[in-house]
Amino acid sequence: MPAIKVDFNKAPFLDSEEFYDLPVEEQNAIDDAAGYTEEATAVDAGKKIISRFDCMKWDTNKEDYCEGEIELARYNLPPEIRWKCKKCGNNGVITNFKGTPWDLSGMSKQEARQYLDEKYNLDLFPGLGFEENYDSIASFEESMGDIMEWLENLSEEEFEDFHRTMEAEAEKMGISLDELDGGLLPAQIHQLMFSNWTDPNAPLYLRDDLPLDMLSEVGFFQNARTFLTEIATNNGFEVTKEQENLQRKYVEVLVDKFIWPDGFLENLKDLKKVINEVDVWPLHTLRVLLDMAGMIRKYKGKFVPVKKNAHLMKAAHAGKLYQKLFSAFFKQMNMVYLTNSDPMPYQQDSIPYILFRMQFMGDEWHSIGNIMGNVFLDDARFEFYSTLNPYTTPALQFYYHIMLPLKYWGLIEVRGANKSKYEFDPEEVRKTPLFDAFLQFNGIFKL
């Protein structure tokens, strides 16, 4: 389903003469976007909320409006607001909302919440005001923790009885509990997806003690270390005035020193006589990641190293740097920015679950289609199939959105066929030894 796009730089002001000259559908889209912007900018970027608006897409079968819940999320990179109906999949993206009358990001959270509560009696949970909704979210998180504590305190016999009860309920629905969500209960999935990856006792712990030689084949990580070494040696990298990207002279140095896949550099120089930062998208992505991870910052027209994290450049701390960058990539950054794609929040949120399922792959090669059919939770699966690119196959889109980022981090290897000088057709993937060395699943989540 194509996204409904509203760009406030191009949209006429609400209630203006130009606004009322637009078709009704466009008027509604802009009006809805204004409300979504207020709600999404009242909370932190990346936080998902349920809008006060119901979906007003017309259902021709029911001859009525959909009225499904609209989920909102605001992102910093790229700066946009994305919304989606949880019922019918109707979705959209809002850009250039900063500085508009509906941008509440300049207010304190308390002021923004009070404003919306008074203006709309905003309901993220039915019947509650804005502040109460946040209390309800916190209560929900706490209740999930209580459920997990209850499960963990069951004796082996009690847990087996509970599991048999769940199996019986699943059988009534015609499904196997072991096949449903990898045999995990909803509370366990919640714990896995929203745990602290740097806690050694969490369901998924990213180890920080890997030696540098174990990371020697991870080109993306080694390029990050090269970038940090060069920026320190040069006392910072000057940026362009227009786009605030790296100046061309630094791009040339980094491109020549980075580790690239076979043929990448030759193809790049064939296509581009003059190379700017955004012409080398993996370099641009890496620079953005280092900024988001707190390893570099912009200061007086330059990108400079962040001194408090400079110690992570030492070989002895390679594991800590790898953990920090991996976590920032999958938790703070839009992971499909690597392929210059729109955010896929449900798929990104479910990365811990995807990795959990992939730990069972063993050392064998697996077709991409087979993996795709076994690692998605329902919301992520719905998002994936509702945003399919009509010019590619599901397996290829899955590869570029999910598998390629994992390949960049050295957790999987890929084999396939070169369709042309510039086009690779991936067919199978398998885990690398780094996958099991870096990702530590604990408790019931352990293989």
Image: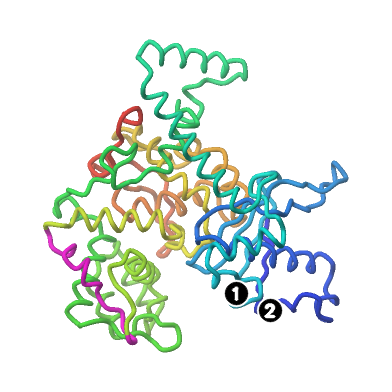
Q: Position of residue 363 (x, y in %)?
A: 29, 35
User: Circle 2 sits in a helix, a strand or a loop, which is it?
Assistant: loop
Q: Tell me the SS state at disc 1.
A: loop
- How crowded pointer 1 is (Cα within 10 Å; few <14, some 14-19, many 20+) is rated as some
User: In the rendering, which numbered label is found on residue 10?
Assistant: 2
Q: Answer left or right for 186 relative to 19.
A: left
**Magenta segment, which residues?**
300-315
- Give the spatial CA distance, label 2 vs label 1: 9 Å
Quadrant of residue 287 in the image?
bottom left
Q: Left or right: where does residue 376 sit relative to residue 9?
A: left
Residue drawn at x 13%, y 63% is: 314
> Which amino acid type is marked by label 2?
Lys
Q: Is residue 62 left or right of residue 76?
A: right
Q: The disc labelled 1 sits on which kind of residue?
A: Asn
The residue lying toward the viewer, choosing from 240 and 278, is: 240
Which of these two is toward me, 310 or 271?
310
Q: Are marks 2 and 1 in contact (CB under 8 Å)?
A: yes
Magenta span contains residue 304: yes
- x and y percent of residue 265 in the render? 31, 71
